[in-house]
Amino acid sequence: MSTDVGELARRTRAFIQEQVLPVERELIVAGRHMDDDVRVDLQRAAREAGVFGPLTPVELGGLGLDNAGLAEVLEAAGTSLIGPTAVNCAAPDDGNMHLLAAVCTREQAERHLHPLLRGETRSAIALTEPAPGAGSDPSMVRTAAARVSGGWVIDGAKHFITGAEGAAFTICIARTGDGGTTMFLVDQDNPGLRVGRRMPTLDHSAAGGHCEVTFADCFVPDEAVLGDVGAGLRYAQVRLAPSRLAFCMSWLGLAARAHEMAAAHITGRSSFGRPISEHGMAQAHVADNEIDIAAARALVRSVARVLDTDGLASSTARHGAAIAKTFVAEAVWRVLDRVVQLYGGLGICEDHLVARFLVEARGFRIYEGSSEVLRTSIARRVLRAHTTPAPAAPIAAAPASAAPTPVLESR
Ligand SMILES: Cc1cc2nc3c(=O)[nH]c(=O)nc-3n(C[C@H](O)[C@H](O)[C@H](O)COP(=O)(O)OP(=O)(O)OC[C@H]3O[C@@H](n4cnc5c(N)ncnc54)[C@H](O)[C@@H]3O)c2cc1C
């Protein structure tokens, strides 16, 4: 790649410092609402600073980075909670860009992908459903699409749909018969799609919130099918590795900034006759943060290189991304928790920002594959290599349940 990624990362960090952090402070301390006006203003500033669109191809006005380049630049953008949005690389748009680029038709690209890449629109992806529908187990999807003349009619309920309010379209994952699922590109102004309430979640920094969405008698034409009918969960799996890694990159940036803030804070604050930074137990927190951040960074960058070399469908990259996501989500939480501790009472007060960082990061251990579900799939991949095939049973005696359970990971 010809781009000087290190230089781009430094410029991105400077842009965040100068133009994004003041807005982040307004959101956290002054209670300003994170809406599309904020997003559009920040993205305009990012374009002027030459740091817009890490995933956007150069011909569409972006930087066209690969995953290795993204690891440095998105970590720099992630030093603010709203930095990834400012550079047009926040979830779920980043994952949807990867998915659409891999699967969509030329017409779908012009209608949905290119405006998304240019920052003209936002998108959503709707898999998760209220019980008894899909959550950790995506094979439990109940939203159904029925074949009708010229298209499909979708019915079902989804929740936790990030960015649904104000999105231009939603990628809906629905059951389409014979146990298969299919992805549909549904325009947000389709009369059959209703964005309900924004769910009152711990985090507040996602443009468009996390919403309840219903599909009621929602007609979409055949051209709205994304990829092949019946391949929805396969595409969802392909989206996971780059999407998980991107979350790791941005949260790592925030953890690294909070770690620097805590180091500065304890150097300036004293107890028992000397700066807190000179007390051994405080230094242990600082060292443990440094270790967690260094390990997380090394893991993310190595998996990013595998993804660039082996491609989205690579099982090695998927396995690596699952390991990275599990480790980084937990490391980020440990770092932010130690940072709050090092700030003392001020760590609990939103004036000092780190309280909000901790609260916002909590969901990271749940979405895009919870730690428990990821550990299950990591272990299964390891153990699969050691499983001795059972001796062939007479066909008549084979139970119907002998089919292996597919290892599907949710987002
Ligand atoms: C902030 C946020 C944003 C989100 N954005 C989106 C979005 O844009 N689109 C979308 O479709 N979804 C989204 N989600 C939903 C998210 O993907 C789900 O919350 C996640 O997949 C878990 O599903 P669930 O909440 O139904 O938990 P459940 O499946 O009910 O699981 C509850 C608990 O049980 C554990 N558990 C489940 N199975 C096992 C197992 N086999 N072994 C051990 N423990 C297990 C889980 O780890 C979890 O701790 C978002 C969620 C959050 C919090």
Image (cartoon, rainbow, N blue to C red):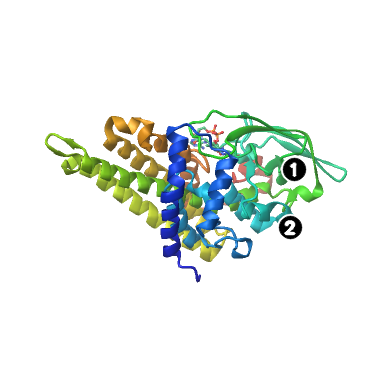
Residue 288 is situated, as x and y percent measured from the top left of the image, at 28, 46
Front residue of 117 and 395 = 117
Q: Quadrant of residue 311?
A: bottom right
Q: Secondary structure at mark 1?
A: loop
Residue contact between numbered discs 1 and 2, judged by CB atoms under 8 Å: no
- Element under disc 2: loop
- On the question of residue 401 being in view, the answer is yes
Check disc 2 and give the amino acid type: Thr
Image coordinates of residue 210 in percent, x first then y, are: 58, 35
Q: Which is more N-terminal, label 2 or label 1?
A: 2
Residue at the spot x=57%, y=60% of the render?
62
Horizontal relation, residue 274 to residue 2: left or right: left
- Residue receiving disc 2: 105
Residue 162: x %, y % from top left: 59, 39
Depicted 269 relative to depicted 79: above or below: above
The correct choice, above or below, for 153 with respect to 378 in the image is above
Q: Is residue 233 left or right of residue 107?
A: left
Is the CB of the residue bearing disc 2 within 8 angstroms of ligand 1? Answer: no
Badge 1 density bin: few <14, some 14–19, many ≥20, Cα 10 Å = few
